[in-house]
Image: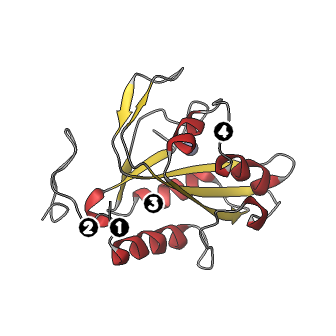
Amino acid sequence: MTVAARGFLDLVADLRSVADRDASGVTDPIALPAVPGGYLLLARLATALPLEVAGLPAATLPADWYVYAGSARGPGGIRARAGRHLRRGKRPHWHVDYLTEAAADLWVFAVPGGRECDLLRGLLARPAFDTALAGFGSSDCRLCVSHLLAVRPGDVRQDRHRPEPGRRRTGAQFK
Ligand SMILES: [Zn+2]
């Protein structure tokens, strides 16, 4: 899969606009701040991911780009929580563990002092993002339909030939 460079930069710019203008995508936990706050996790699935997970209907996430929003209030803050996402070989416990274990690429954008639901609201106001799977990561959230968003494929893929079954075809997304 080839990533359209401009599309990817636009995506990162969108994440920074709701996170922190200076936030950079981190792949090494040591580079994350050990303070409380929120974070955005950008993940690329190179192949479809079937999910049979407690608390969710059976579903398949198509190969696509995803953004998960989380928060870390415990000891070690964002570094401890998001660092877990970046580590491979976890025993899945949270919904997001299934995504991070399967992802071909992962980046974390730390948002010290931020809240995940606010970050999600900011992203959903932009046309490039849509709810990926209702209930994912949001079992204990009363505000959000999901804490996982899909990035509409036309925005980041160069070699897109056909939309995934069931995906919306809107506007200029599929030229
Ligand atoms: Zn929420």
User: Marks 1 and 3, how far apart in space?
Assistant: 21 Å
Which numbered tag is attached to residue 123?
3
Q: Quadrant of residue 161?
A: bottom left
User: From what the image shows, is residue 99 above or below residue 82?
Assistant: above
Which numbered tag is attached to residue 89?
4
In the image, what residue type sits under mark 2? Gln
- Give the image quadrant in which the ligand numbered 1 is located: top right
**Residue 171's spot in the image, x, y percent?**
15, 62
Q: Nearer the viewer, mark 1 or mark 4?
A: 4
Q: How many marks?
A: 4
| Relative depth, front residue between 55 and 88 | 88
172 vs 28, left or right, is: left
| Relative depth, front residue between 151 and 122 | 151
Residue at screen point 63% across, 73% down = 23
Which numbered tag is attached to residue 3?
1
Q: Which residue is under mark 2?
A: 158
User: Marks 1 and 2, how far apart in space?
Assistant: 6 Å
Give the mark nearer the N terminus: 1 vs 3.
1
Whether tag 2 and tag 4 are in contact, CB under 8 A, the answer is no
Q: Nearer the viewer, mark 2 or mark 4?
A: 4
Disc 1 crowd rating (10 Å Cα; few below 14, some 14-19, many 20+) is: few
Which numbered tag is attached to residue 70?
none
Whether tag 1 and tag 2 are in contact, CB under 8 A, the answer is yes
Whether tag 2 and tag 3 are in contact, CB under 8 A, the answer is no
